[in-house]
Amino acid sequence: MVQYSETRLDASFAALSDATRRGVLEQLGRGDASITQLAGQFRMTLTGMKKHIGLLERAALVTTEKAGRVRTCRLGVRALEEEAAWIGRHRELWNARFDALDKIVEQLKSKEKADARRTKR
């Protein structure tokens, strides 16, 4: 069984749980941007955007670099492979459960049809 770093997963999923932070990641996927640019684009205060960027940085999804008074944000070097693997594992479990449920439903339908045929006789 694959072992996951719960702290890393917690930080990633917490960062990804907010629509603004997901939007920031999409924006940074198109190119680097300053915190000021991001705050303007998302119509929020600099302080609010700094908090969002801080959460993304703690999850290693974003890095920042300060040059003078401008703090530039870019996507972090860490991709989401670990998170995707965790989701994939749980998807497999749910798919197996749904497949088993489908089999039970089919068995019940077959039994119901057989019972209905016997009743008609």
Image (tube, grey):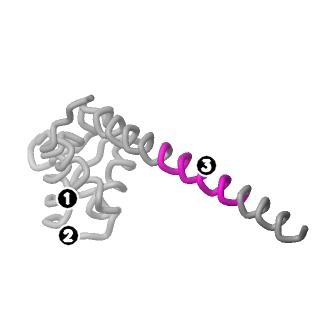
For label 1, count other residues whose C-alpha is less than 10 Å away and answer few (under 14), some (14-19) or many (20+).
Answer: some
| Image position of 105 (left or right of 52) | right
Select label 3 or label 1 by which is in front. Answer: 3
For residue 37, what is the image quadrant?
Answer: bottom left
Question: Magenta residues: mostly which secondary structure?
Answer: helix
Query: Which quadrant does the C terminus fall into?
Result: bottom right
For residue 75, what is the image quadrant?
Answer: top left
> Mark 3 or mark 2: which comes first in sequence?
2
Q: Secondary structure at mark 1?
A: helix
Q: In the rendered structure, are the residues bearing label 2 and label 1 in contact, judged by CB atoms less than 8 Å apart?
A: no
Magenta region: which residues?
Answer: 96-109
Mark count: 3
Determine the CA span between mark 3 and mark 1.
46 Å
User: Which label sits on residue 73?
Assistant: none
Residue displayed at 50% across by 45% down:
95
User: Which label sits on residue 103?
Assistant: 3
User: Which label sits on residue 45?
Assistant: 2
- Say which of 112 and 59 sits in front: 112
